Amino acid sequence: MSHPYPAAPATKPTPVGHPAQRPRGDWSLSWHGVRTVARLELTQRLRSTRWKVALGVWFLVVGAICLLISTTVTTNSTRSIETGPLMFGLNVMFILSMGLLVTPTLSSAAINGDRIAGTLAILQVTLLTSAEIAIGKVLAGWVASLAFLVISVPFILWSFLAGGVPVTAVLSTLVLVTLMLGVVSAISLGFSALVSKPTGSTVLSYLTVAALAFGTLIVFLLTLIPMTSTQQSSVLQASEWDATTGEVTACEVQFTQERVMHTERTWWLLAMNPYVVVADAAPGHETFDVMRLDPLSGIREGVRVARNGASEPSSSCPAEISGVEEQVPSTAPVWPLGLAINLLLGAGAIALTVRRLRIPQGKLTRGTRVA
């Protein structure tokens, strides 16, 4: 008697090592997985009315401030002062400040907010890896913050059209501001994975941004006193002159004592400051010119002077007699070091996020919702 139900068709066993059975590690990455997570995050934001309102308010606020800066600069400046660099520098500093304020709110609740809502576990039980979830959420927060930067570009171009600003300065400024916003997005996501409450992660994100933007300057200023010492310096000074031509004919060594601030030991504190990174990377005059009033040049020169430290006492002895050539202070850029430090902070935050998203978790914080 035949069986009433047909036998199931025989299936070939999947060989060991087949992609369908091969386990994926936490750091396995695919563009499809990252794009899926990022698209989910961005879709939620695009559906939110608050997102559109925030963009509109941002455009109006940035526009009003840039108009105020333009009107003030144009009205109060004389013809001998270039208004373009001043407008451009002030606009860039303001847009960067606003970006640093807005970006933490876009990523500081991306992990713990989904965990509280019970939607994070849904992503974790799929084929998505921890790295794909983390990088997808960072990418979504980064793109969301860049939307605020994109609508600010017309005001940057407005100050560029005022003249006196090279095209390379505009391009480098936009690139560096973009990278800084990406770093802040990664740091905020790291705190979101580390802290169980969105409020706590948001506060920690803002404290970190404040430490980078203002804390580095405050700590640098506090180190000036302990880094100041009295030292004796020897310098060649003119001692004899030609009675006919008045030229120096002989020199002698003179010893002087002076108070010296060794800023060359702590200048790196300023290098990681986001404002310093953006200002130092913008091409322009290496020295601050009163006739330009360029804030970016002022920041760039100040940091490079701090890196060079105290200068040697001036000598009135010509190099032809002393045989000692005057040393020219280094004008090498500072921003590569600062950018590297910030990128390391962002990479560390992403690594922490991947670690916190790993499943199964051996220990969960009290009160943490799994699903």
Image: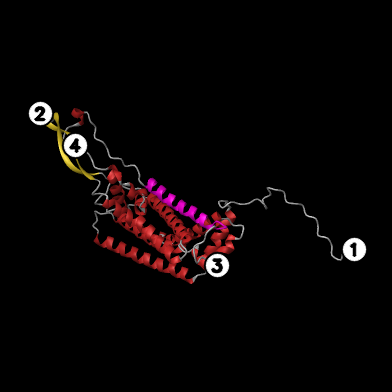
Query: Which amino acid does the dot numbered 1 rest on?
Result: Ser
First-in-chain label (2 vs 1) = 1
Question: First in sequence: mark 3 or mark 2?
Answer: 3
Which numbered disc, 4 or 2, marks the residue that appears first in the sequence? 4
Report the predominant secondary structure element of the magenta stretch: helix
Image position of 213 with respect to 60: above or below: above
In the rendered view of the protein, which quadrant contains the N terminus? bottom right
Report the mark closest to the observer, 2 or 1: 1
Q: Residues within 10 Å of mark 3 (few under 14, many from 20)?
A: some
> For mark 3, what is the residue?
118
Q: CA distance from mark 3 to mark 2?
A: 90 Å
Query: Mark 2 sits on what residue?
Result: 242
Q: Local crowd at mark 1 within 10 Å, few (<14), some, or many (≥20)?
A: few
Residue at horizontal 23%, vertical 30%?
324
Label 4, label 1: how far apart the Cα atoms are: 109 Å
Between marks 4 and 1 in the image, the one whose residue lies nearer the viewer: 1
Q: Which residues are magenta?
A: 335-361
Whole-number angstrom distance, CA of label 3 to CA of label 1: 50 Å
Query: What SS does tag 3 mark?
Result: loop
Q: Is residue 219 magenta?
A: no
Amino acid marked by disc 3 = Gly
Residue occupied by mark 4: 233
Q: Tell me the distance, in whole angstroms, between the alpha carbons under discs 4 and 2.
A: 27 Å
* Camera-side residue of 275 and 245: 275
Identify whether 229 is placed above or below 325. Answer: below
Residue 286 makes an appearance in the image: no
Whole-number angstrom distance, CA of label 2 to CA of label 1: 128 Å
Q: Which mark is residue 64?
A: none
Residue 294 position in % (x across, y down): 29, 53
